[in-house]
Amino acid sequence: MSAPTGTTVGEILSANLLYHASLKQEIEWLFLETLGWSRHQLITDLDYVLAPGERDQILSRLERLVKGEPLAYILGHQDFYKYRFIVSSAVLIPRADTELVVETALDYLRGRRIEGTEIQLADLGTGSGCIGLSLLMDLPKSRLWACDVSLAALEVFRKNAKALGLEGRVLDSNSDVSGNLFENIYDTIVSNPPYIARGDERLQDSVRQFEPALALFADHDGLSFYEAWIPWSFKALRESGAIVFEFGEGQGEAVLKIAQLAGFKKWTLKKDLSGKDRVLLAIKE
Ligand code: GLN
């Protein structure tokens, strides 16, 4: 329970910190974001008396937070890589580990130095669009095709494309890749597909409870999307094009094998922030 006592920032803040010490960072961030304050103000302006509307908003947000809802859904946005993305409960909350997909794709594309030519990108199961849209932001001469089976997710993607001023460079499709046949089109195909095996006990409670199952779980030990999307990508890539796919803990070898069977000739596995294999870069040539 949040403690709805008081009308000043200091009263509400201290009552909540007392009851929910483990949520200290989130509670403070919630105040800053809701009031549009700097961290400094949260020290100096504790006597500020909240207007009724502000108080109601803070209390209802605190109530959601202490019930375990992720802060990103409460605030409606999440920072990822260099940009801020709108999120709703229809999409996965962008993760810091996933920035490795963006960085790997950028390294690869910049290394090829195809100056002057337009880079064609695809983002499979785009969700919020955090991967594909970050690439568009950093690669001025590029275009993106993004698909997702969830229309609600695609609506979030569209909002993000608009907010980042990228509408003119994206094409989206409310579909799975299998309904689309493209050959020799893309320079890079990125994806963070659903990869959690159904029944995996290691999943955090808040993820299971609040994030969309459609974006999380996959059949066949979590590998079914790699089995479908990697061979599809091989055909859809131009010669010397590459896939950059994120995968889950312990799936590296299996995902690499799928890529080898699909015909990819060169590959690298990249490690995440905690030193575990997390991303496959595989090149077609
Ligand atoms: N591409 C999005 C992300 O990385 C969505 C991924 C997904 O829904 N599995 O956050």
Image (spheres, rainbow, N blue to C red):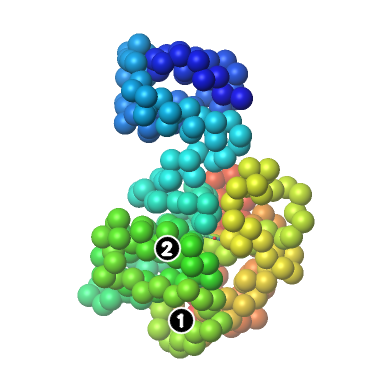
For mark 2, does the 10 Å Cα neighbourhood hold few (<14), some (14 to 19), or many (20 or more) residues?
Answer: some
Q: Nearer the viewer, residue 30 or 262?
A: 30
Q: Earlier in the sequence, mark 2 or mark 1?
A: 2
- Residue located 45% across and 25% down the image: 28
113 w.r.t. 284: above or below: above
Nearest-to-viewer mark from 2 and 1: 2
Q: Position of residue 213 (x, y in %)?
A: 63, 58
Q: Secondary structure at mark 2?
A: helix
- Residue located 63% across and 43% down the image: 206
Question: How far is the residue under mark 2 from the one under mark 1?
Answer: 26 Å
Q: Nearer the viewer, residue 257 or 78?
A: 78
Horizontal relation, residue 53 to residue 4: left or right: left
Q: Which residue matches tag 1?
A: 237
31 w.r.t. 97: above or below: above
* Type of the residue with mark 1: Leu
- Which mark identifies residue 155? 2
Q: Is residue 170 visible?
A: yes
Q: Which image quarter: residue 128?
A: bottom left
* Type of the residue with mark 2: Glu
Horizontal relation, residue 218 to residue 212: left or right: right
241 w.r.t. 245: above or below: below
Q: Position of residue 240 (x, y in %)?
A: 44, 80
Quadrant of image for the N terminus = top right
Q: Secondary structure at mark 1?
A: strand
